[in-house]
Image (spheres, rainbow, N blue to C red):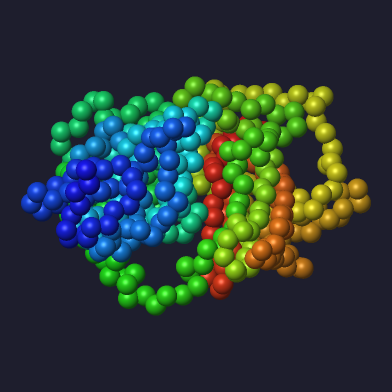
């Protein structure tokens, strides 16, 4: 039996899970979803290729699921009204690692991101620090695609107690919402129908603007791969300093600072070289003052010296919200360094630009130490500024949490 499709969208459909969704009178459409097969979920690797006739763009719809089922349907309807193809993951895959890879791949296959946020932070994989929902937003930021953000209004009626998260999740959600309101212009919704109307309005503006824009090199497949700070050994403690796991706090709270490392490389796609021209450390949030519950002791016997000189090794000091210029190790044995002249790590007397040619196998390793020099709780991340075919882009790292009591 052939699946029914909306005549307004044409007779073609994409491989996926059929979902009956009212669209006009007695009409149905197919919605792309992560679908379970042997070995877990399978994900189509196509973006707009093979989309139904009449569909112009693909959007990742990101939100928590359990508390926002009706709202997700409202966003789905809004997308279809405007001719935007919604990508939605309704069910978690069989494993935590697969959940993350599937959701981020869906963002990679989309041309814009739609985020809906209420009062739940979402599922955090064991050992992780961020929910799958926040990782989807972070991936959209890294890709530099348009992001439409909708927050539940304080005037919203009919909330159930189970829809409101408490404890550590509530604190993380508060921080995420603060970031969203800082980085984007957000809209608030008071009901599922109000959300649908807001999404339609935003999508019409987006599609109209996108279709007027001339095609350019921004569509290049070439991009910069940056290793995740959540990977093992990418974040390690300072010598002699413990890593805390306070109740209700982040799973990993470094003390006094943190060692970090990144591997940078061309993604191997497209034909354009990549020029990394700036790297910065950003203080996402700083809460000053001593925290008795985070008290720690340094093991003096474990303190080690400067170590062996390696290429691209830096040190940067942070005083509250103030980040000092980075110092690069030139020769650790001789004690020679090169200091940046601004927040950009590469802004030295001999300016640095790391170039990753298309088709090349060049890999660069950045290693460094962040020292927090004022009492308080820090949330830190790195920002990488680069260009592809003359178009500026940026990626941001995962947030590192550090407490300094020294």
How far from the left and from the top, in percent, is residue 239? 75, 32
- The foreground one among 292 and 336 is 336
Q: Is residue 105 left or right of residue 48?
A: right
Left or right placement of residue 220 versus residue 51 in this view = right
Please say whether residue 61 is visible from this viewpoint.
Answer: no
Position of 401 relative to 206 (above/below): above
Left or right of residue 185, residue 292 in this image: right
Please report the residue visible at 25 percent of the width from the left and 48 percent of the height from the top.
30
Q: Quadrant of residue 295?
A: top right
Q: Quadrant of the C terminus?
A: top right
Query: Residue visible at 33% across and 29% down?
Result: 165
Residue at image point 76% right, 54% down:
312
* Extreme residue in the left direction: 25
Where is residue 83? Give x, y as percent.
24, 61
Counting from the top left corner in percent of width and height, residue 18 is at: 26, 43
- Residue 227: x percent and y percent? 62, 47
Residue closer to the observer: 218 or 252 = 218
Number of numbered markers: 0
- 405 or 217, which lies in front? 217
Q: Residue at x 26, y 33 (%)?
A: 67
Residue extending furthest front? 1
Residue 271 seen by the camera = yes
Q: Quadrant of the N terminus?
A: top left
Q: Is residue 270 above or below residue 237?
A: below
Query: Relative to 259, is 142 above or below?
Result: below
């Amino acid at each position: 039996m052939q699946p029914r499709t909306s005549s307004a969208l044409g007779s073609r459909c994409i491989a996926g899970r059929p979902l009956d969704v009212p669209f006009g009178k007695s009409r149905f459409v197919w919605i792309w979803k992560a679908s379970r097969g042997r070995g877990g979920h399978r994900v189509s690797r196509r973006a707009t290729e093979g989309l139904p006739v009449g569909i112009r763009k693909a959007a990742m719809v990101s939100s928590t699921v359990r508390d926002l089922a009706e709202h997700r349907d409202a966003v789905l309807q809004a997308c279809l009204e405007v001719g935007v193809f919604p990508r939605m993951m309704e069910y978690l895959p069989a494993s935590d690692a697969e959940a993350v890879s599937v959701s981020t791949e869906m963002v990679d296959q989309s041309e814009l991101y739609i985020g809906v946020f209420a009062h739940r932070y979402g599922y955090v994989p064991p050992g992780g620090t961020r929910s799958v929902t926040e990782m989807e937003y972070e991936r959209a930021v890294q890709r530099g695609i348009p992001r439409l953000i909708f927050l539940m209004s304080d005037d919203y009626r009919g909330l159930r107690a189970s829809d409101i998260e408490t404890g550590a999740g509530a604190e993380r959600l508060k921080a995420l919402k603060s970031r969203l309101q800082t980085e984007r212009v957000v809209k608030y919704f008071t009901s599922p129908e109000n959300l649908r109307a807001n999404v339609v309005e935003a999508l019409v503006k987006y599609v109209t603007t996108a279709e007027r824009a001339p095609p350019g090199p921004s569509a290049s497949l070439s991009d910069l791969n940056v290793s995740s700070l959540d990977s093992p050994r990418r974040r390690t403690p300072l010598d002699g300093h413990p890593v805390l796991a306070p109740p209700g706090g982040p799973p990993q709270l470094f003390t006094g600072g943190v060692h970090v490392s990144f591997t940078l490389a061309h993604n191997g796609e497209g034909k354009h070289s990549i020029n990394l021209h700036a790297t910065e450390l950003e203080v996402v949030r700083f809460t000053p003052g001593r925290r008795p519950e985070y008290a720690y002791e340094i093991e003096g016997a474990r303190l080690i010296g400067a170590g062996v000189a390696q290429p691209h090794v830096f040190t940067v000091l942070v005083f509250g919200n103030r980040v000092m210029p980075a110092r690069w190790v030139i020769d650790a044995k001789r004690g020679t360094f090169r200091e940046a002249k601004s927040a950009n790590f590469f802004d030295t007397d001999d300016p640095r630009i790391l170039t990753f040619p298309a088709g090349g196998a060049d890999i660069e390793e950045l290693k460094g130490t962040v020292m927090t020099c004022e009492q308080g709780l820090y949330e830190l991340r790195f920002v990488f500024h680069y260009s592809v075919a003359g178009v500026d882009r940026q990626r941001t790292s995962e947030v590192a949490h550090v407490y300094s009591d020294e």
